[in-house]
Amino acid sequence: MTRTNRGQLRRLVRKPGFARLYLARIVSQVADGVFQASLVSAVLFSPERQTDPAAAAASFAVLLLPYSLIGPFAGVFLDRWSRRSVLVYGNSARAMVVLGVAVVLSSAGATNPMLYVGSLTAVSVNRFYLAALSASLPHVVSRDELVSANSISTTSGTLATGAGGALALGIRAFAGASDQGSAVIAVVAALLYLGSSVVAAGFAPRTLGPDHSVLLPRAFAALAAVARGLVAGAKHLAARPPAWQALTAMGVHRVCYGATLLGTVLLYRNYFSASGIFAAGLPGLAQVVFATLAGVLVAALITPRVTRRTGKPAWLAANLGLAAVTEIAFGLPFAQGPMIIGSFLLGVVSQATKICVDTTIQETVDDDFRGRVFSLYDTMFNVAFVVGIVIGAVWLPATGKSYLLLILMGILYALTAVWYAQASRAVSRRA
């Protein structure tokens, strides 16, 4: 870590509001990693079940698409409710749901439909929770600290999710790979969610916004208010080209990343075998996750420094170009060594892109609209990812090995990099 980065971190952590919001995020995202690992273990890597592209895609779609259809409604309420209450009660409710998932896993197994109902509920709350965190951040740091705060917060959160996954692997080694073992992992996740609620409860009411509270209407009036709020949020976003252009770039990235991730899961599930230091199955996928997290950390360290020199648009476009090269150069060999390197580079791309997009939205969107825009952002984030997963399910064989798919993803990344660089320069010239 550079001296500049260390100084920024020290200054931010000394701010009580940022430190508490940061800790609430970390504990919650460790819980996310633990819970997600319990689901992956039970649904995709159980020794009792086979996994093909359609089955894997269906699992992702069932968990993400229903929320994506209702997700924009969350933003209207984030702009009306106390965000502190969202952070406290959201994770408390999620802890109860995850305990229910543990009961289902233990008694009925991963094929029971109630597993998907509970998991869908937990995922839905998570997107709502993360949107509240992003909308709250400008209330605990100054405007000129947003890039560094986003870098530290989102990167640490991603690393925390990875740490949660590693913790789950350790629990799995002790509790076993069965559905009962996955249930034990889910119980640990529930306890961590409760811990995050306790941390967030330390904020005073309304500390995290919104700035202008509004009484919620009832019943049909509430639905009408939601619809009007969404329209207003979309218009607000459309009037700010830097924001919607950044969101478009992120959407393309998520499509490509979804297709690539499905291929990676299938390769480690059905194609690769253990060789030397490289593992297969869930331990091999864990190596990919750790390489990705290393890339995330590097992106967090260099992005604030680079964007001060080049600006966010240039750095975002450069990362999309890097992703194009990575898909071709490190994906096409279909070997574990290059796959690890490619995962590291895509980790850099994913985190650098997220930091730039998050900060662009926070800087260009008014606070009264921020909750709505971040909920739209989260919905796009999920829908684009599922679209990528579905594309992968159509193109990929059961082994996950497809030259054509990786070439297409590389071309799509490259075209998006060129478009975004040109579009952002045009906006800059008009400003």
Image (tube, grey):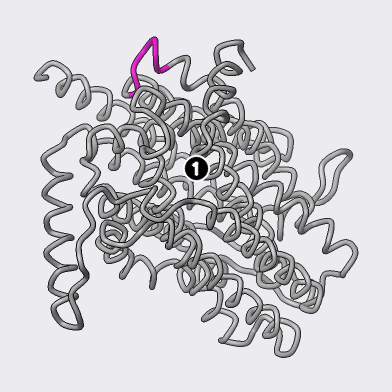
| Residue pictured at 61% horizontal, 71% vertical | 95
Q: Is residue 394 above or below residue 5?
A: below
| 318 lies left or right of 342 | left
| Residue pictured at 62% horizontal, 50% vertical | 264
In the image, is residue 309 part of the stretch drawn in magenta?
yes
| 319 lies left or right of 71 | right
Residue 360, x across and y down, in percent: 30, 32
Residue 247, x across and y down, in percent: 29, 42
> Start and end of the magenta stretch?
307-312
Q: Is residue 184 above or below residue 361?
A: below
| Residue pictured at 64% horizontal, 41% vertical | 159
| 218 lies left or right of 298 | left
Main secondary structure along the magenta-highlighted residues: helix
Q: Secondary structure at mark 1?
A: helix
Residue 174, x across and y down, in percent: 90, 64
> Which residue is denoted by mark 1 in the rendering?
406
Residue 208, x across and y down, in percent: 38, 48
Q: Nearer the viewer, residue 107 or 417?
A: 107
